[in-house]
Amino acid sequence: MLNRHLRFRDLMRTIAALVLLLGAVGCAQKDEMVTAEQEGASRAGMIPFTTESEAARALCEEGEYLSDVGRNVQAREKFMAAAAEDPTFVRAHFDQSNVAISYKELQNCLDKADVNIESVSEGERLMVEISRTFLTNDTEQGVQLASQLVEAYPNSARATMMLGNMQTATGDNGAARESYVRALEIEPDSPGALMAAAASYLYRKPQDFTMAEECAQKMTAAYPNEAKGFELVGDIKRAQNDLDAALEAYDLATEKDPGLAQAQLKKGHVISFLGDYGDALTAFDVAIAAAEPENKAAFATYRAFTYIHAGDIDTALDVLESVADEAEAMGTPADQVKGQQVFALSNEATAALHTGRYDRAASVIGRRNQLQMEIAEEVGTDDAHRLQKADCRLWDGLLAAYAGDLDAAVEHAERIAVLVENDANPRKLEPHHYVMGMAYLKLGDYPKAALHLRQADFENNMFIRYHLALAEEGAGKAEQAATLFADVAGYNFNSVGFALLRKEAMARMAG
């Protein structure tokens, strides 16, 4: 499922999430080199696998289904096993890159794919090139390559879905939905296209919960034993503010698959929204116990938001700090520890900034930025260094903005713009505008704050959307502000920003 958007502050997580649906289902091919006859057959709708190993092909097929429905950790295990069966299997390395859970893993998988790239099909080569655009922040090139893939394989639902994913990455939600509809016309029961279309209608503007629910119903009808479809229904019920129905759907998902930790985690979110904080913590504990090692630290981070919902900021900050300290001890794989630490510390920094704990925020941001640059060093590419520097400038800029230091905030924002100036990504300046918008908001210059925040990621980020509402309200645009406040109040998807602002937004609506 597509659950993320491109933001430099979440670079590693967004890379993994945005490429989640780039896997491709194909037909088995026995020859190492793809023949013209095989390529011609594949254009009927399948992008070929290039491997001599039936075992490797079968593992990839299993993994691609798991990836499609959002079972990333299980999918990753299948792809790694496929690569072990055939180390020259480009598709296996590519598929693993789609569900990679660290920046370094993504880079390494694509590097391994490149070793044998000359011996694979045109479609497989294009897939690898598309994934590489996430490493260079070149989403426009990604759209061009995905368009070439569709041209080469016009009857492939997977190719068309991949184009939709890249269009989503650039913010062209209308075009993305057209691609998902086309993919479903080609293959009505495609689990990846159903999940991607539902996610688009559910999370992206303009939202259409009716269409999202229609996709979810098709998913559960086509795959009645797949618990992730019922988890998706729960997500849609949350968006419709029917929290009781959401809990029922998550309960059904966990009944179908008692080991589905993600659905259990989401029960914790909903219970915290309902104000039953003790029960919410218990639900999170169950989820963490059931989670794969790769997810335990992230789940523990979400658990900490319960204390924010309860109004206990100090405990929340301490718990988030402890998650960063204990990520390795939780069993997190070694190459993912720093990424999980950055995730926990980013949330801690946001909460500290919002509640005026600037000394603590400065310390936390310093620690997270050091880890972020260590990750860049481990990856070792110029693009990794550049993009991680931009990410660090974002956090330094936010710290300056909250502290009322306009000059320092502007300096950091301008440096972000310089670092990404050559990137072919229409959303590349969103972090720049976020810093500028927050700086002007804190200084009370509401028109300038609104101007910049409308160019930040306010459509997808409820924390930014709330501050845009404050700016519009301050600028005398009460109607626009009320609409934005309402969006935040009824969002119902957990994040540190939502935990910090949900009650404030609801109070403004009630007042």
Image: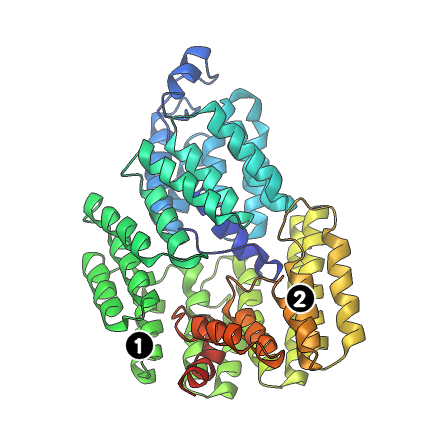
Q: Nearer the viewer, residue 54 or 500?
A: 500
Q: Position of residue 412 (x, y in %)?
A: 76, 66
**Disc 1 residue crowd, few under 14, some 14–19, many 20+, Cα 10 Å:** many
Q: Nearer the viewer, residue 427 or 323?
A: 427
Query: For mark 2, what is the residue?
Result: 452
Query: Measuring 31% from the left and 43% from the top, which residue is drawn there?
Result: 191
Query: Measuring 46% from the left and 17% from the top, which residue is drawn there?
Result: 34
Q: Secondary structure at mark 1?
A: helix
Q: Quadrant of residue 324?
A: bottom right
Q: Position of residue 256 (x, y in %)?
A: 19, 57
Q: Quadrant of residue 433?
A: bottom right
Amino acid carrying label 1: it is Ile
Q: Position of residue 95 (x, y in %)?
A: 45, 39
Specify whether 34 is left or right of 275.
right
Residue 368 visible somewhere in the drawing: no
In the rendered structure, which disc, 1 or 2, sits on the residue that comes first in sequence?
1
Quadrant of the frame with the C terminus: bottom left
Q: Nearer the viewer, residue 386 or 77?
A: 386
Query: For mark 1, what is the residue?
Result: 271
Q: Position of residue 327 (x, y in %)?
A: 50, 68
Marks 1 & 2, CB-CB < 8 Å contact: no
Specify whether 248 is left or right of 95.
left
Q: Is residue 467 above or below residue 5?
A: below
Amino acid carrying label 2: it is His
Q: Secondary structure at mark 2?
A: helix
